[in-house]
Image (cartoon, grey):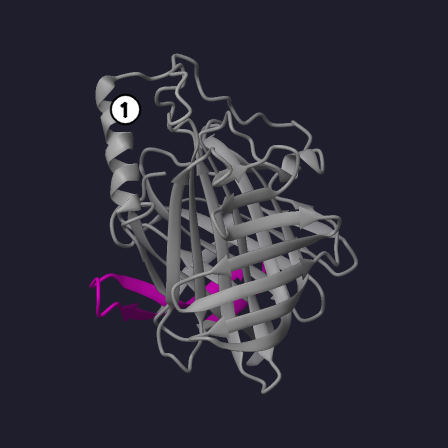
Amino acid sequence: MRRRRFLASSVLLLATGVVAADEYPHVIPGHPLQFPKDAGAHPAFRSEWWYVTGWVQDARGNSFGIQITFFRNRPRVAETNPSAFAPRQLLFAHAAIADPRYGKLRHDQRAARTGFGLAEAREETTDVWIGDWSLKLVDDHYIASVTARDFEFDLRFSSTEDVLPQGQQGFSRKGETLANASYYYSQPQLAVSGSVAIDGNGARVTGIAWLDHEWSSEAMANEASGWDWLGINLNDGSALMAFRMRDRSGSTLWAGGTFRESSGTLRSFELNEIRFTARRRWRSPRTGVEYPVAMLVNVGNVEYALEPLMDDQELDSRANTGTIYWEGAVRAIRAGQEVGRGYLELTGYWKPLKL
């Protein structure tokens, strides 16, 4: 019922045609990222997200994947309306747990307009919440609290390395034109501690996670249908991010990536240095969508094989952000040996993604 009221009021405001006249700001090359302020929200931009993904393990040695995501959107609807109920900023959240013992992804989602202390994304630093779901940066660690339908997270993610700016010092190209770009940084190799409860059964966990924070106004070219993205925490302390934007035929429109050695040495990769190749596909029994869940990823002259923790890591968010995607815990294998763990994200396989 709350979701219906939220959607109905948003549609009504759209129908009135009350839209602000100002433009969304552009992402500009050479703009320096500043912390802790840039860890916070950027409400003038069209879209923004904070993504935390990771692998954790309980005392019995069971490994599973976790995802906590908050999205912010500025719809430019009724921005001149003085009513506190006007949806100037919208927040969405996804949470998921990939436990092979269950066999498929468990997930839940939230949606709200900001205001009234019920949902907010603060500008000073990372501090975003919808009801009892929250992600907050305190000193050098993030605190996440999520109470979902059949699982709970009470987790702490502690920084072990400096912030990793993606692209050109945080300016991340997503297409041929400069407008198709985002401000983007990561925090790999986050040390995880805390508790996870599934069906009321709690366990203390530890592990390694990855945080992405990205904001933009036009991150996708018109001809783009979606993307493949990976973030891998490698066992030697290094970190790898790689992505490609796909067109409607599945061909690569744009690609990029970053590799940071444990020593701190940084290397960025260009379009012709990144290649994603499907090794095995899986078709969802619920939606019929087919995903390349096992991949070969070539980054420069290095090749990684990605193997999913389990095939069924599909997240259906049609009632929330209006799309279906695959967000899965994967192992990175090189020369037959596991060299790291992380997450693979596959969007636009259901139908072309619209941010």
Residue 44: x percent and y percent? 51, 25
Left/right placement of residue 245 relative to residue 337 reads left
**Residue 160 position by quadrant:** bottom right
Q: Would you place residue 207 above or below residue 326 in this image?
A: below
Q: Where is residue 184? Give x, y as percent.
A: 58, 40
Residue 290 percent coordinates (x, y): 26, 63
Residue found at x 25% / y 43%: 4
Residue at the (62%, 48%) spot, across then down: 136
Q: Is residue 319 magenta?
A: no
* Residue 20 in view here: yes
Relative side of 191 to 153, left or right: right
- Viewer-proximal residue among 90 and 114: 114
Q: Nearer the viewer, residue 266 or 28?
A: 28
Q: Please provide the residue range marked out in magenta.
A: 280-306
Question: Is residue 338 visible in this depiction of the protein?
Answer: no
Residue 298 located within the stretch drawn in magenta: yes
